[in-house]
């Protein structure tokens, strides 16, 4: 600066602060590095303060999702029902998977599986796009970014609760009477929601950096669906396989949550006094709890680690 | 400066009073890495050969957008940033907002700065009404506060001046309407540091006047406002201090009148 007509620099600190370097000045007045990631507890507090945002965002998105379709929100229920119909035809009738089940229960078993798996599938898919599809919002306003994947999981949960009505009708129509086990639906769904949130947080971070992942996800989800036994009992098919493969299969979270919900809805399928029945491994609740809590914690910390990077570049 | 009558500007410029800094920019360098800038590197065969040969993608180019800029802004200041297109003004703002990592140097701010840009889309498929509510909730307001401020925000934006547009999806808005609504939402909260990137240019005359008043209010409530604009009259009206950036380097930092005059004449100090 070699100007003659500039008596005082507007930038330099004055008075008591004169002569401080920029860094010293910033430290003295407690200025923080811009865009730095807050600590885990501070972050959680900020996120809790945004709970109304998460809920309102989820509700608004859910309503807007089907505004272009003539049948509107009816599609939320019709799509999984159509899936159920195709699966019933192919796996139940043509491949006769329904033989390992007590009379008339296969269709209920199938529908519960389809709806429950779809809950996780949607959470995975929307989680992958949670950050990359909302860059405008992220760059315009400041809020804890974890709000977005969590809001998308809330959307999936709201959708599931709507389709639950159809599910209950299907279950009742196939001759299953409601019992005390129906109370178990609530904790089972809670655990699955925790698990889905965790997965969604992990994929949101990966999807924000690597857009290639969205090409891979449909394939992974299809493979996962066939390996989880949505339309046939996977336990029956692998019962002659080596023990470690069976153990590995029994750790599959999708199978665990489907088992828990199928048992809660229709305990008759798992009743050992029936001539043909399915078996519910005794550790299923413990595994479900571990997957739910574990995945949520891992996903939350993993997502938070990159908080300052979302929307950059 | 020998006047006995001390106006606000003179107090700010008084050489012996310590002022509270809100933004400290300390020798900042910013480098963009652009992927796929090379020619014809996007084909499947070249991607495959890159993976096999484990070479770093040849298509990455580095753009040194900001080269060692330092300045300090204080409470109650409105600072204009001027310079030709591509000089690094918007990059500087994005970095202050914490949206761009710095290659070297540090940016320290008081609280979380908010960046208001022309391109910052909100949720296009939702109605204006929903955008107002969600935007306010995202900024951390409670539902009660949002209800209390809602009408004020809509009136400020002027969206409903020509009929009930607030209940239409935002994708149906003209670019000016969208920008007005976004500015109104962001300005509803008192920010410690507000960064405005050309956002005023899109509104009509009446809206620009309202915005300038609002910026003045934010400044008086001890905030700091940065304004990037190619409209030198806006800069003159709003800012008392201006920073001139050219090719990523700080050319001049001083009182608006002087800096803008020299910028318009193209005389570098």
Image (cartoon, coloured by chain):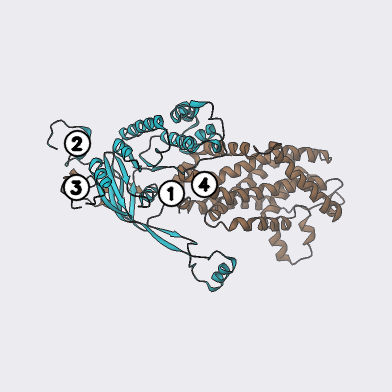
Chain colours: A brown, B cyan
Residue, disc 1 = A39
Closest to the camera, between mark 2 and mark 3, is 2
The kind of secondary structure element at disc 1 is loop
Q: What chain does mark 3 sit on?
A: A
Q: Which label is found at residue A146?
A: 4
Q: Are labels 4 and 2 assigned to the same chain?
A: no
Distance (Cα) linking label 4 and label 1: 14 Å
Left or right placement of residue A39 versus residue A266 in this view: left
Earlier-in-chain disc, 3 versus 1:
3
The kind of secondary structure element at disc 4 is loop
Q: What chain does mark 1 sit on?
A: A
Marks 4,1: beta carbons within 8 A: no
Which residue: 33% across, 37% down? B234
Is residue A30 among what the camera can see? no
Residue B68 locus on image (x, y percent): 30, 56
Q: Is residue B214 above or below residue A307?
A: above
Residue, disc 3 = A18
Q: Are labels 3 and 1 assigned to the same chain?
A: yes
Distance (Cα) linking label 3 and label 1: 33 Å
Q: Nearer the viewer, residue A167 or A145?
A: A145
Q: Is residue B189 above or below residue A194?
A: above
Residue, disc 2 = B10
Q: Nearer the viewer, residue A186 or B9?
A: B9
């Amino acid at each position: 600066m070699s100007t003659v007509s500039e008596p005082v620099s507007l930038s330099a600190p004055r008075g008591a602060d004169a002569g401080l370097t920029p860094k010293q000045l910033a430290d003295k007045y407690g200025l923080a590095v811009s865009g730095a990631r807050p600590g885990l507890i501070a972050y959680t507090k900020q996120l809790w303060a945004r709970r109304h945002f998460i809920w309102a965002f989820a509700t608004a998105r859910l309503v807007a999702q089907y505004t272009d379709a003539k049948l509107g929100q009816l599609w939320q229920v019709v799509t999984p029902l159509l899936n159920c119909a195709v699966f019933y035809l192919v796996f139940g009738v043509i491949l006769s998977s329904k033989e390992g089940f007590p009379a008339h229960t296969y269709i209920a078993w199938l529908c519960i599986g389809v709806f429950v798996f779809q809950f996780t599938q949607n959470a995975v898919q929307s989680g992958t796009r949670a950050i990359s599809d909302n860059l405008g919002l992220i760059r315009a306003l400041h809020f804890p970014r974890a709000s977005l994947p969590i809001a998308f999981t809330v959307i999936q949960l709201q959708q599931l609760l709507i389709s639950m009505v159809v599910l209950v009708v299907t279950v009742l129509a196939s001759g299953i009477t409601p019992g005390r086990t129906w109370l178990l639906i609530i904790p089972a769904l809670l655990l699955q929601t925790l698990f889905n949130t965790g997965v969604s947080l992990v994929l949101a971070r990966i999807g924000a950096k690597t857009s290639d992942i969205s090409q891979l996800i449909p394939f992974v989800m299809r493979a996962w669906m066939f390996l989880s036994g949505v339309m046939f009992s996977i336990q029956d098919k692998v019962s002659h396989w080596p023990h470690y493969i069976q153990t590995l299969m029994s750790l599959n979270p999708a199978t665990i949550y489907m088992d828990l919900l199928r048992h809660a809805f229709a305990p008759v399928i798992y009743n050992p006094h029936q001539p043909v029945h399915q078996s519910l491994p005794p550790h299923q609740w413990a595994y479900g709890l571990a997957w739910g809590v574990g995945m949520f914690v891992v996903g939350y910390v993993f997502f938070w680690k990159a908080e300052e990077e979302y929307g950059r570049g | 400066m020998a006047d006995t009558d001390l106006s606000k500007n003179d107090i700010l410029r008084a050489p012996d009073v310590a002022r509270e800094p809100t933004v400290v920019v300390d020798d900042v360098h910013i480098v963009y890495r652009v992927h796929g800038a090379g020619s014809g590197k996007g084909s499947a065969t070249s991607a495959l050969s890159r993976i096999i040969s484990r070479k770093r993608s040849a298509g990455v180019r580095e753009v040194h957008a900001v080269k060692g800029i330092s300045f300090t802004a204080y409470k109650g200041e409105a600072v204009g940033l001027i310079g030709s297109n591509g000089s690094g003004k918007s990059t500087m703002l994005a970095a202050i907002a914490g949206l761009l990592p710095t290659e070297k140097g540090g940016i320290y701010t008081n609280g979380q700065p908010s960046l208001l840009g022309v391109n910052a889309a909100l949720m296009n498929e939702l109605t204006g009404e929903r955008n107002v509510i969600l935007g306010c909730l995202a900024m951390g307001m409670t539902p009660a506060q949002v209800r209390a401020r809602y009408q004020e925000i809509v009136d400020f934006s002027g969206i409903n001046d020509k009929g009930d547009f607030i209940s239409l999806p935002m994708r149906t808005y003209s670019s000016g309407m969208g920008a007005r609504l976004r500015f109104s939402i962001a300005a509803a909260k008192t920010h410690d540091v507000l960064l405005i990137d050309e956002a005023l240019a899109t509104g009509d005359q009446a809206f620009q006047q309202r915005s300038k008043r609002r910026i003045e209010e934010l400044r008086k409530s001890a905030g700091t406002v940065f304004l990037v604009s190619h409209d030198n009259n806006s800069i003159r009206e709003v800012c008392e201090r201006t920073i001139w950036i050219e090719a990523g380097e700080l050319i001049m930092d001083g009182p608006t009148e002087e800096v803008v005059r020299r910028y318009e004449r193209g005389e570098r100090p």
